[in-house]
Image (tube, rainbow, N blue to C red):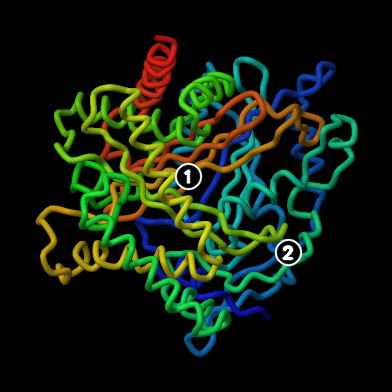
């Protein structure tokens, strides 16, 4: 048995009936050109013959004496984890996303290893889809991507001979991290700092002091957890989800980034900000103050594919600015400030710094304990994640990967999440939100397109 890290344990303890804490993703796949009409059924039958699983796909959670452990499931049942579904006609993307919304709303049974894969056929264009979900106590975003990618190949023939994802042996962790836990876990942070030694504490304190001094002196590039305005995104959630997904050409983001001397991630954040601004304006719900996003940052220093090893940056989305280029420049400056700060911290120090940054706003949101905080504030308005994907064409079980759309998690007070995967030729957006709290969430996809087009026009001018 293996004891869970404090962060991984927290994801199990925080879970509620209306708040499942698994992450997922939708893969769009093109079958081989010579595929028979029953290709999906044949694939499902072949996959169901795979009755062995490797770590972490054979681990289920157990609790003893108040502690959580991973236990190997000696009675692994593939029928509990692989589900073959067919879309109702006419098999449009609309029906596919509706199906993914429903299955992503359902909890994973803790009597079994915490993952499930849905093989979906019936799309009108002949493609098949795979929706995969796994509990966040098992992996973070980067690790989840690695789990999927290691069962793919650049060769369609080789991929058809590869074992299923759950049979792939785990990667050896080549470099030990000071801490295995996310920035949202104070216990994990303390553990990491204790291993790094007390010498790390003054460095963290000095950086926190400098950050708050910069904020107090009016530096517009500094964001703290005491300035995000409460808005429509910061409501309690229900158990129902709405999932929306769309791809946009990578060169469009690269061209805008090159024009302003920024990164693709800067442009992604700016496009998300533009979409949120337009969406909230339509609902007459845009705050006067700019929205703030939590942007997870991987601090993984090995090639491991399990556990959670992330910190985060806090970013001013400048949604109060109407000019798209001015908004992008503001976001870029904010990210540049965070990057400069992060370079001076070790992974354990960075996690401690991130948690300490969040504490004042979190205390205010949960118990109103932070003195002097303006009423109506929240630590942040949403999470925007950007995960690197494959840099070349990839194949899974003989099928060409044609889209990879992440579906993350939401919690009370954070009813919306945007997660993005950058592939070599496309940037794939996955949006997940509370169905009741955020009406017509799918319209944000149009706003993303419009926001990107505005930036293209602005840099061209």
Q: In this view, does 230 lie to the left or right of 458?
A: left
Q: Is mark 1 on a helix, strand or loop?
A: strand
What residue lies at 56% left-to-right and 41% top-to-bottom? 25
Q: Looking at the rendering, in which quadrant would you find the N terminus?
A: bottom right
**Which is more toward the observer, 189 or 153?**
189
How many marks on residues?
A: 2
Q: What element carries label 2?
A: loop
What residue lies at 30% left-to-right and 32% top-to-bottom? 276
Q: Where is residue 91 in the image (x, y as percent from the top left)?
A: 55, 20
Q: Is residue 51 left or right of residue 103?
A: right
Sequence-earlier tag: 2 or 1:
2
Work out which residue is located at the far bottom of the displayed protein and give it.
Answer: 65
Please tell me the numbered disc located at residue 200.
none
Q: Position of residue 108 (x, y in %)?
A: 52, 57
Q: In this view, does 54 lie to the left or right of 364?
A: right
Q: In which quarter of the image is residue 173?
A: bottom right
Q: Quadrant of residue 332?
A: top left
Disc nearest the viewer among 2 and 1: 1
Q: Rate crowding at label 2 as few (under 14), some (14 to 19) or many (20 or more) other CA atoms within 10 Å.
A: some
Q: Do the residues labelled 2 and 1 touch (CB within 8 Å)?
A: no
Q: Mark 1 points at which residue?
A: 385
**Which is more toward the observer, 436 or 429?**
429
Q: Name the residue under label 2.
A: 55
Q: Rate crowding at label 1 as few (under 14), some (14 to 19) or many (20 or more) other CA atoms within 10 Å.
A: many
**Which is more toward the observer, 83 or 226?**
226
């Amino acid at each position: 048995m293996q004891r869970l890290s404090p962060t991984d344990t927290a994801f199990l303890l925080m879970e509620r009936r209306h708040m499942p804490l698994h992450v997922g993703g939708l893969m769009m796949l093109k079958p081989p050109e010579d595929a028979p009409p029953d290709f999906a059924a044949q694939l499902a039958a072949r996959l169901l013959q795979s009755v062995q699983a490797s770590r972490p796909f054979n681990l289920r959670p157990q609790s003893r004496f108040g502690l959580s452990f991973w236990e190997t499931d000696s009675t692994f049942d593939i029928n509990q984890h692989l589900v073959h579904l067919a879309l109702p006609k006419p098999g449009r993307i609309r029906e596919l996303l509706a199906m993914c919304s429903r299955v992503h709303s359902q909890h994973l049974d803790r009597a079994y290893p915490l993952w499930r894969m849905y093989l979906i056929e019936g799309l009108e264009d002949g493609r098949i889809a795979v929706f995969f979900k796994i509990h966040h106590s098992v992996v973070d975003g980067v690790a989840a991507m690695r789990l999927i990618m290691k069962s793919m190949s650049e060769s369609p023939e080789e991929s058809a001979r590869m074992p299923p994802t759950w049979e792939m042996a785990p990667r050896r962790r080549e470099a030990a991290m000071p801490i295995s836990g996310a920035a949202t876990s104070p216990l994990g942070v303390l553990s990491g700092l204790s291993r790094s030694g007390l010498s790390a504490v003054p460095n963290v304190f000095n950086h926190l002091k400098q950050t708050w001094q910069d904020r107090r002196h009016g530096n517009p590039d500094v964001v703290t957890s005491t300035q995000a305005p409460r808005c429509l995104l910061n409501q309690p959630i229900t158990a129902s989800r709405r999932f929306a997904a769309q791809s946009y050409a990578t060169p469009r983001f690269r061209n805008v980034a090159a024009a302003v001397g920024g990164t693709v991630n800067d442009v992604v954040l700016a496009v998300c900000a533009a979409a949120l601004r337009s969406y909230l304006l339509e609902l007459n719900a845009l705050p006067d103050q700019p929205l703030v996003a939590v942007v997870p940052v991987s601090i993984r220093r090995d090639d491991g594919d399990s556990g959670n090893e992330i910190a985060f940056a806090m970013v001013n989305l400048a949604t109060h600015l109407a000019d798209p280029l001015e908004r992008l420049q503001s976001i870029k400056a904010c990210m540049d400030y965070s990057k400069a700060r992060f370079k001076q911290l070790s992974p354990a120090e960075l996690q401690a710094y991130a948690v300490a940054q969040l504490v004042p706003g979190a205390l205010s949101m949960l118990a109103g304990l932070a003195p002097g905080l303006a009423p109506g504030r929240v630590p942040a308005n949403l999470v925007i994640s950007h995960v690197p994907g494959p840099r070349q064409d990839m194949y899974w079980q003989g099928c060409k990967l044609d889209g990879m759309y992440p579906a993350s998690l939401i919690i009370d007070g954070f009813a919306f999440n945007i997660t993005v995967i950058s592939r070599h030729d496309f940037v794939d957006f996955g949006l997940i939100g509370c169905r009741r709290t955020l009406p017509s969430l799918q319209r944000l996809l149009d706003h993303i397109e419009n926001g990107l087009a505005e930036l293209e026009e602005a840099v061209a001018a």
